[in-house]
Image (tube, rainbow, N blue to C red):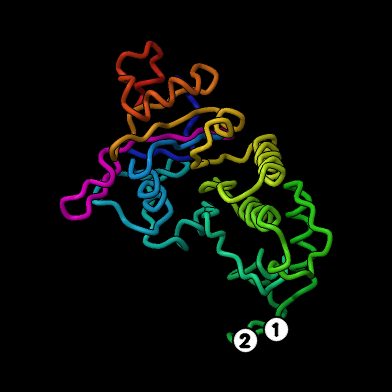
Amino acid sequence: MTSKQPVLQITNLTKHYGGVKALTDASFRLLPGEHAAIVGDNGAGKSTFVRLITGVEQPNSGDINLDGQSVHFSSPLDARDQGIETVYQTLALAEDLDVPANIFLGREITRLALGPLSVLNHKAMREQSASMLSTTGVKIQDMSESLRGMSGGQRQCVAIARAAGFAKKLIILDEPTAALGVAETARVEQIIKGLKQQGIPLIIISHNLRQVFDLVDRIWVFRQGRIICSRLTRETNPEEIVGLITGAIDPATLQSAEAVAC
């Protein structure tokens, strides 16, 4: 076991909707600089887990610790203020706005703050946007172009660059390449690898096991509303992960202590 303090430590997180047990006693950890994947069938509890740790919903019970401090998020803004940036499948982008306006959406830099009549500092937002894009390796030829004219891959890259630019603690990516073609998927994956080189902790939710094994250090397996185990990527294989997801393999039979850490 490592002595590093986790960036994120989840203990016995539980969410029930009446008689429906969406998530029960889920425990999870993310170490500094680590990239982890959340995998499991539809309905396994992955989306509920993400909604709970990003403040979209509140758990019935359980603890969330961020950098060793107990936290409670009453809204996604609370999680964002604490340094957690999430890129959902919907991306939360405004198609009719340009790149800087999307990157600073809800966080606009102003020359003069007068509420709805505030004067925006477009130059500062353009410069900082260019820096964020450059840092993450995202290449957008014309930042003044509205996102409506961009491909799905370009939009995804803008959303990831925004998350990386503002994330103080970690980034969560929900199926980041689900709707992309082969070339655009490769581009997004290269950006994720760049985040790894920068030491930015990341959680990725993905059904693509090839992608998971290419990108992450550890895989957390969800099944029927529980986290049944975690496996270091280097110590497992796709066949084993599929067996854990489907129930064909009992995690208690695995030899590695890491397999039953949770």
Q: Residue at x 41, y 38 (%)?
A: 9
Q: Where are the magenta residues, as a range?
A: 12-34
Quarter occupied by residue 216: top right
Q: Residue furthest front?
A: 181
Q: Position of residue 82 (x, y in %)?
A: 49, 54
* Quadrant, the C terminus: top left
Labels 2 & 1 near each other (Cβ < 8 A): yes
Which numbered dot is residue 119? 1
**Residue highlighted by disc 2:** 114
Q: Residue at x 66, y 56 (%)?
A: 152
Q: Position of residue 17 (x, y in %)?
A: 22, 54
One can see residue 169 in this view: no
As helix, strand or loop, the secondary structure at mark 2 comes to loop
Left or right position of 253 against 86? left
- In this rendering, the answer to whether 126 lies above or below 51 is below
Packing grade of label 1 (10 A; few <14, some 14-19, many >=20) is some
One can see residue 132 in this view: yes
Q: CA distance from mark 2 to mark 1?
A: 7 Å
As helix, strand or loop, the secondary structure at mark 1 comes to strand
Packing grade of label 2 (10 A; few <14, some 14-19, many >=20) is few
Looking at the image, how many numbered discs can be counted on the residues?
Answer: 2
Q: Amino acid at mark 2?
A: Leu
Q: Residue furthest left?
A: 19
Q: Residue at x 64, y 52 (%)?
A: 160
Q: Earlier in the sequence, mark 2 or mark 1?
A: 2
Q: Amino acid at mark 1?
A: Val
Q: Position of residue 90 (x, y in %)?
A: 53, 59
Q: What secondary structure do most residues of the magenta stretch adopt?
A: strand
